[in-house]
């Protein structure tokens, strides 16, 4: 349902070649980051089977990163200079978010697998809808096709492993992971909003409070000599000062 | 006295512990957190240092932060005021960054370690660089030159360091060049212009420079003017780093040098555009070298001293270091293994110990191995769990087997003892390979390091035979101790050392003294007996975008994900199984998934 509702937005986002290139390049970074998280998970797990699967998964993510990067670079190079600096609208095309700022070190296998499963599922749904709106760009569509095949495998193995390591609690863990994703989504939104508000307030302060001080600072800068300036021996006499 | 040094909040945070005048432990946060260039407050590094020494935070006599946060804030605010109104975009971000965490360092340290505020001290950024360079160097008296992007205000300083017979040590900074006039920021601006990541891609600019010709030196000299007193200043019309965080060069810079390279655009040296980028790199490299050589030469004439200690991120530029050694008149040049900001943690602790608390000076052991030690038994366990064949060998067997592997063209991941402090792998967390063919270089770039083909690899050679293969000037072997200099490979050896000989016939040599790493020295000798040349290609044990491996498990995961053939950790040796066996393992895991 969500995908149907978002179809017009995705069509618009992926129509523009510059946005297509920048989104793919961004996905490349995210996949690489996700791959590093999985490597960390493999290094931390005491379960040899999970270790092998996580390393295999990490290699997939690295390969996806390379696929996205190579194709995004090709699209990017095909653009003229003015198109490259076009409006990116990245936030309208979510991909995976690494492992969503997960603190791998603090998680046990069960919660991690639940989170991975949902992450892969959500990414697979997003990538499938991007592929569907890319009828006019078969090469980019082929990239998503290739990635999607792996995502389905990742979804399956994470679920199967979750059932293996937590046979009694896997449903609970999945629900917890869903709630955690929701919470993180809310935090991201709240942080973004806080960033906008604080940015606005600081910009207002900048234009209202700073001009007279700026005048004084500029005047002082004009008088400042260039070249070597002597260092007074007293300046470093004390280590107590923060200034 | 127990003194903890900390560097944090810009890039590459670290902690170092000095007890009774001697470094006990030093490690970068990235090696423990596994986030490359981790700039976060180094809690893991601090914890490890204290654990390693077996002390609680309350036992510390002082904690020294490597710069003065309020002075830095003063520079950030003043720069925003001076650039008004062009700084309107950068201002909110800079304020959020500073006020959010960076200016409350005393409180942060105090609350994390539970220490009273009076125990928390601050050195100036370039004081820390100077201390890391001088107090860790085996010299009695030396001139000091520190240069980097920027600390609080200073970007370049010169000074003097001395050790008196009564055990007192002194560091006197004589003068400084202040922000925004900065050699480090000039170089970083070109790093960004050439499409590389600032604070990380500077190595790439140096590597690329060898492929170009310095045809744009006059244009670069329009950006940086020498002042009558021998210093330099930047023409700020060409830069934007002082007004915005988004871009470091201005439209005028682009008018002068042409279109910047996109990070996603490959550098094709066959094309005119690719050669232009290489020429840009060669030109800024030459101007940087010329400027540093002239500053060093003036310092030599002024002080009459024969030794120079260099610190700051610019001291990682091995090509410039070699020219300074060859042309400035100094006989010896000391660059510590961690001349960048991470090394400031150790510098700050040593400064507090020797200068602030006036404790007697003692020579710091002349090696870079201050981090956590690798546990070979952990590799044995991992390998057994994964049904990999693993052997535990004594040193002699291990050295011989590894030499056989290397002669057979295998790539070896090598972990032993404590991890290096600083950006360079100097044998304790290294990937070794045969240095003879260009195919090996290409294989390492393509299958293991996943990096640009123009980047060179470094050789490691026993110090006693280094001169046979490399043109080392007087003092060159010392500079090469921590891989801090670039020297010419003797012409007769270049074809037989193709994997480590850069396009311009040079190599970033590491000369190895037996006492610093006896087992690697034995490996070099053993390899030399088999191949006729006791030199190995030595590159850091990590993959692109990842920090150098620390524990056995990290080496093992890197080994499994890359084209490394053999992994050695401590006394354990694991050889990669045939790819069919790995495939079988994955299929078996997949079956269990399906089941």
Image (cartoon, coloured by chain):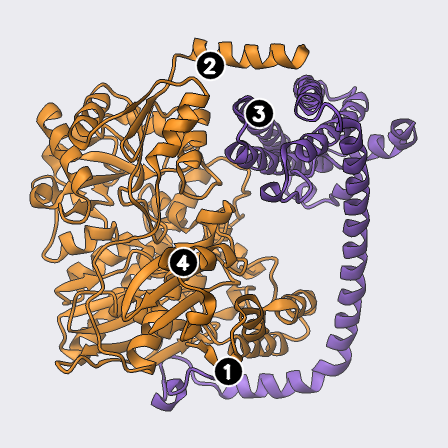
Chain colours: A purple, B orange
Q: Nearer the viewer, residue B34 or B315?
A: B34
Q: Is residue B314 visible?
A: yes
Residue at point 38% right, 55% down? B52
Q: CA distance from mark 4 to mark 1?
A: 28 Å
Dots 4 and 1 on the same chain: no
Q: Is residue A95 above or below residue B107?
A: above
Q: Is residue B26 above or below residue B514?
A: below
Element type at mark 1:
loop
Residue A243's disc number = 1
- Looking at the image, is mark 1 or mark 2 nearer the viewer? 2
**Residue highlighted by disc 4:** B49
How far separated are the C-alphas under marks 1 and 3? 51 Å
Chain ID at mark 2: B
Q: Which mark is residue A50?
A: 3
Q: Earlier in the sequence, mark 1 or mark 3?
A: 3
Name the residue furthest bottom. Answer: A234
Disc 4 packing (10 Å; few <14; some 14–19; many ≥20):
many
Q: CA distance from mark 4 to mark 2?
A: 38 Å
- Percent coordinates x, y for residue A170 in the rendering: 75, 27
Element at label 3:
helix
How crowded pointer 1 is (Cα within 10 Å; few <14, some 14-19, many 20+) is rated as some
Side of B415 where B434 appears, left or right: left
Mark 4 vs mark 1, foreground winner is 4
């Amino acid at each position: 349902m969500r995908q149907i509702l978002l179809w017009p937005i995705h069509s618009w986002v992926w129509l523009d070649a510059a946005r297509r290139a920048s989104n793919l390049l961004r996905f490349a970074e995210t996949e690489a980051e996700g791959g590093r998280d999985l490597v960390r998970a493999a290094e931390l797990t005491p379960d040899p089977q999970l270790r092998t699967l996580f390393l295999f998964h990490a290699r997939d993510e690295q390969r996806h990163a390379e696929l996205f990067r190579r194709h995004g670079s090709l699209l990017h190079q095909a653009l003229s200079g003015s198109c490259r600096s076009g409006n990116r609208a990245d936030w309208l095309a979510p991909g995976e978010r690494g492992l969503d700022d997960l603190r791998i070190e603090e998680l046990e296998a069960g919660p991690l697998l639940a989170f991975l499963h949902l992450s892969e599922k959500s990414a697979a749904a997003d990538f499938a809808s991007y592929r569907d709106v890319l009828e006019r760009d078969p090469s980019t569509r082929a990239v998503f096709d290739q990635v999607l095949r792996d995502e389905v495998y990742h979804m399956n193995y994470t679920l199967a492993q979750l059932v293996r390591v937590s046979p009694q609690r896997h449903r609970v863990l999945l629900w917890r992971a869903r709630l955690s994703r929701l919470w993180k989504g809310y935090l991201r939104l709240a942080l973004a909003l806080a960033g906008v508000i604080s940015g606005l307030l600081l910009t207002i302060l900048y234009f209202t409070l700073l001009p007279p001080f700026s005048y004084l600072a500029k005047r002082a800068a004009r008088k400042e000599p260039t070249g070597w300036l002597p260092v007074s021996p007293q300046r470093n006499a004390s280590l107590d000062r923060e200034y | 006295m127990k003194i903890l040094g900390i560097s944090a909040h810009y890039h590459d945070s670290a902690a170092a512990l000095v007890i009774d005048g001697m470094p006990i432990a030093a490690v970068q946060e990235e090696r423990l957190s596994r986030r490359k260039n981790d700039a976060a407050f180094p809690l893991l590094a601090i914890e490890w240092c204290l654990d390693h020494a077996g002390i609680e935070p309350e036992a510390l006599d002082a904690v020294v932060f490597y710069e003065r946060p309020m002075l830095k804030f003063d520079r950030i605010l003043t720069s925003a005021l001076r650039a008004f109104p062009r700084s309107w975009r950068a201002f909110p971000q800079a304020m959020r960054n500073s006020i959010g965490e960076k200016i409350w360092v005393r409180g942060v340290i105090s609350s994390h370690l539970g220490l009273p505020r009076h125990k928390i001290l601050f050195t100036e950024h370039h004081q820390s660089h100077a201390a890391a360079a001088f107090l860790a160097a085996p010299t009695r008296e030396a001139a000091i030159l520190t240069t980097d992007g920027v600390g609080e205000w200073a970007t370049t300083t010169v000074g003097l360091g001395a050790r008196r017979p009564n055990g007192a040590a002194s560091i006197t900074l004589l003068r400084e060049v202040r922000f925004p006039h900065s050699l480090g920021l000039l170089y970083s601006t070109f790093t960004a212009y050439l499409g590389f990541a600032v604070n990380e891609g500077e190595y790439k600019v140096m590597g690329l420079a060898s492929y170009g010709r310095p045809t744009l030196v006059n244009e670069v000299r329009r950006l940086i003017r020498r002042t009558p007193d021998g210093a330099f200043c930047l023409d700020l019309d060409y830069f934007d780093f002082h007004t915005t965080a988004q871009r470091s060069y201005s439209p005028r810079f682009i008018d002068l040098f042409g279109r910047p390279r996109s990070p996603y655009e490959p550098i094709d040296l066959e094309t005119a555009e690719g050669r232009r980028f290489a020429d840009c790199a060669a030109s800024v490299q030459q101007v940087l070298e010329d400027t540093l050589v002239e500053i060093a030469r003036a310092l030599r004439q002024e002080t009459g001293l024969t030794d120079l200690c260099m610190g700051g991120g610019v001291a990682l530029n091995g090509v410039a270091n070699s020219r300074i050694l060859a042309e400035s008149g100094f006989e010896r040049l000391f660059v510590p293994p961690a001349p960048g900001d991470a090394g400031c943690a150790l510098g700050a602790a040593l400064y507090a110990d020797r200068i602030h608390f006036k404790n007697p000076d003692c020579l710091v052991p002349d090696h870079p191995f201050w981090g956590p030690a690798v546990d070979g038994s952990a590799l044995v366990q991992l390998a057994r769990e994964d049904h990999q064949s693993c052997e535990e060998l004594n040193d002699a067997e291990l050295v011989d087997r590894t030499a056989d592997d290397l002669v057979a063209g295998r790539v070896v991941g090598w972990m032993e003892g404590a991890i290096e402090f600083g950006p360079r792998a100097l044998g304790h967390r290294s990937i070794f390979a045969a240095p003879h063919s260009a195919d090996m270089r290409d294989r390492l770039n393509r299958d293991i390091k996943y990096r640009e083909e123009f980047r060179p690899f470094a050789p490691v050679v026993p110090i006693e035979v280094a001169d046979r293969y490399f043109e080392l000037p007087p003092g060159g072997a010392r500079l090469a101790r921590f891989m801090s200099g670039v020297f010419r490979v003797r012409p007769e050896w270049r074809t037989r050392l193709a994997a480590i000989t850069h396009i311009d016939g040079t190599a970033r040599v590491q000369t190895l003294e037996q006492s610093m790493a006896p087992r690697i020295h034995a490996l070099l000798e053993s390899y030399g007996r088999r191949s006729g040349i006791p030199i190995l290609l030595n590159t850091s044990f990590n993959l692109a975008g990842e920090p150098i491996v620390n524990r056995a498990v990290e080496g093992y995961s890197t080994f499994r994900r890359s084209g490394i053939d053999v992994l050695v950790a401590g006394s354990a040796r694991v050889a990669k199984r045939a790819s069919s066996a790995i495939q079988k393992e994955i299929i078996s895991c997949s079956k269990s998934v399906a089941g």
